[in-house]
Amino acid sequence: MYRGATSAPSGRAGSQAASTKASASGEQSPSGKVRNGATPYALVLAKRLGLRYVTSNSLSIRRARRGRGWIYIGENQHPIRDPKIIRRLARLAVPPAYGDVLYATDPDAHLQAIGRDAAGRLQYRYHSRWEDVRELRKSRRLARLADALPRIQRRIAQCLASEACTREFACAAIIDLVTRSAIRAGTEAYTRLHGTRGAVTLLKSNVTVRGKVITLKFRSKGGKIVTKEVAAGRLGRAIRPLLQLPGRRLFQHRLENGEVRVVTAHEVNTCLREMAGTSISLKDFRMLLASARVLETLARVKPAPRERQRRKQVLAAVSAAAEDLANTPTICRKSYVHECVVRAFEQGVLERFSTSLKHSRSPIGRARVLAKIIATMGKPSWSQGQRGSARAR
């Protein structure tokens, strides 16, 4: 599956996706030490999956245009003739627009291909079994968030009850805004480089408060203009004193000496982890909200008898969630929607949770239902210590 600047892979060797570039290991080792481009955890994981960990420098098959199609040039600089190899490379479905495309010679390499998109960003396509790691990480993150959500909401209420514009007050307001709106966190670096905004870097001019309704309008990642309305009286009351502080930025705090400083994404995520008592980030709320939106949409429809029709049903649900996140459906599906939700729908399992969903309209309730569905659908066999065939399909 491709990973690069914008989306995440699906877990099937023939499907297309791009993703936010991340560590290929899927999870860092406690030591964090890296050897040959991999953490110790990544090397152990590759072995457990029956895969060979490789670096991008080892990819030696290149793609070349011939007529309206492609040929694949091997290390010996001659076109590859083996139909089995050609089928494997073609199934990776590297977009035609990508340049400098290289493939792995080993079908069991954890990294199968790389290429550059139209913007010059390097994209990665991984083995399907390696991509299952991403779904396991989503499961763990959602489980942690579901468990911590009641604590987080209590702490937000306590912090926003204060009238002082402290750092904790501003951080709590940002966390509350993200949990309600699903907008990106935003960072100082991204704002400087691209001129785009997220929750942390919003300007006062991006926000209007009228009664209980908060209206946001700002340029988000990718240059897309995002307009959202959030109905939240408590949050609206919290934003009003922040608007009175000097400076253009919305989320600032006043020090004891009277100095006013902006809040950083690092400070907000640190505050969030302290509230939760576990390792989570603002991005996890986008995953929760997207998965919950897809869950609620699919729970209202009966799975179609034909696979093609079911794919359309899933796409419609994901597209609605993507609109909420200001993402494309592809990115939303691969990065934010847990695959267990889709599988539960396709297998008719969601019907078991219809009653729970009707009585779970709060974020805490939705998070708990999601956690139950993920537990019901189970984990990948390799995560249980079992090894199966890992040859690319």
Image (cartoon, rainbow, N blue to C red):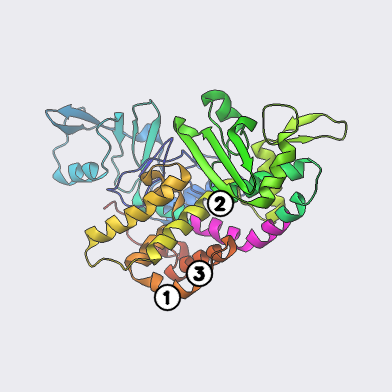
Q: Is residue 363 left or right of residue 61?
A: right
Q: Nearer the viewer, residue 299 or 267?
A: 299
Q: Earlier in the sequence, mark 3 or mark 2?
A: 2
Query: Disc 3 and disc 2: Cα gap in Å?
Result: 17 Å
Q: Which mark is residue 352?
A: 1
Residue 76, percent from left and from top = 22, 29
Name the residue tied to disc 2.
285
Image point (32%, 59%), residue name: 389
Above or below for 83 versus 382? above
Q: Which mark is residue 372?
A: 3
Above or below for 44 versus 345? above
Image point (38%, 40%), residue name: 18
Q: Quadrant of residue 312?
A: bottom left
**CA neighbours of label 1 inside 10 A, class few (<14), some (14 to 19), many (20+):** few
Amino acid tagged 1? Arg
Q: Nearer the viewer, residue 237 or 123?
A: 237
- Residue 386 colored in magenta in the image: no
Q: Main secondary structure of the magenta part?
A: helix
Please indicate, yes or no, whether residue 29 appears anywhere in the rendered image.
no
Image point (38%, 52%), residue name: 318
